[in-house]
Amino acid sequence: MNTQYSVKMRAAKDKDHRLGGKHISGAERIVDEAQLEEVCKSMVRRALCHPKGKADFINITIQNLEGKSVQYIEALDISEPHVTNRIETLEYVEKVLNTFKIDTRVLEKLQSIQDMRGAMLLDAYTLERLDGLDQRGVRVSTMDYNKELDIEGYLLKYGFTGKYVKDAIALSSKVASAPGVLLELCWSDDPLYTTGYIAGKSIGYIRLNHFKPIQHQSGGRIILVDTHVVKVDVLVEYLQNQAVIINSYPLMVEAK
Ligand code: AMP
């Protein structure tokens, strides 16, 4: 078997992230040695052509995964409820939250997020912040699709172009596979992109048109956790460092 490598990119404007630079873009892959150079090249391109601006600082970290455990998981199913405006979308999301007995004020928390690099981990029942990582939050990383899958071609057949859905499905499938995670809510950093999602093991990846307010400048990601099931440090370690390969195509299913 070929040696696999984890490749992580993060890009910032004006200053490095560690010095408070503005986050522009991030990307994660797990690849064979033969793919390393090409993958780094496309990450640089992404950082230089992002709608949030042209990155000034681009960090690429490459880690050899030899000797590390790799977990194989299924992709979440994708569904897309028919909603025509933000009010309908929020009603839909509130119904989902109610079925999980989660306080709908989590939506206010999502909207209050400003320029975080990672996700907020919140207690699913008290909405208390769990990760203690302030603006950094938890970076879900070290995941990718099985390279035998033509995931871009597959998604294109259903009208999904670009990297957003592909990356979001990989990330949300890893998050949903983690112990103790009930739901994840997300909207993008891109000020012009109002589609977001709510995802979880039992509901799949529900793509939400009109979720983010128009011209809202900040992206946001919240992971709702049942702390009776998992310890926070164990969950953070899984989300950040466990290598995960997604081994199947996401099925397109009817929205409930
Ligand atoms: P994006 O979907 O890349 O536009 O990111 C939307 C928001 O999700 C960002 O503002 C971050 O707060 C968060 N985020 C982005 N990438 C990650 C990641 N790898 N892990 C956790 N949260 C992330």
Image (spheres, rainbow, N blue to C red):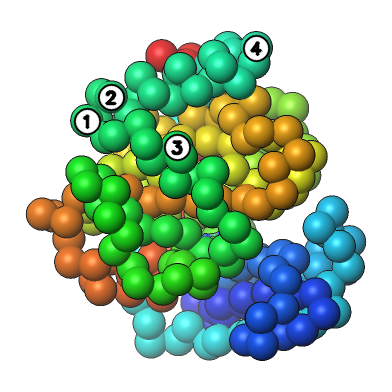
Q: How far apart, in angstroms, are the residues tagged by discs 2 and 4?
A: 21 Å
- Closer to the N terminus: mark 3 or mark 1? 1
In this rendering, position of residue 121 left or right of residue 137? left
- Closer to the N terminus: mark 4 or mark 3? 4
Any atom of ligand 1 within 8 Å of the CB at mark 2? no
- Mark 3 lies on a secondary structure that is helix
- Mark 2 lies on a secondary structure that is helix
Any atom of ligand 1 within 8 Å of the CB at mark 3? no
Mark 2 belongs to which amino acid? Answer: Asn
- Do the residues bearing badges 2 and 1 touch, measured as CB atoms within 8 Å? yes
Where is residue 227? Give x, y as percent.
17, 56
Where is residue 237? Give x, y as percent.
33, 74
Mark 3 belongs to which amino acid? Answer: Leu
Q: Which mark is residue 181?
A: none
Q: Which residue is mark 4?
A: 84
Q: Can you name the residue that lies furthest to the left here?
A: 228
Q: Which mark is residue 107?
A: 3
Residue 154 appearing in the image = no
- Closer to the N terminus: mark 2 or mark 4? 4
Q: Which residue is mark 2?
A: 98
Any atom of ligand 1 within 8 Å of the CB at mark 1? no
- Do the residues bearing badges 2 and 4 touch, measured as CB atoms within 8 Å? no
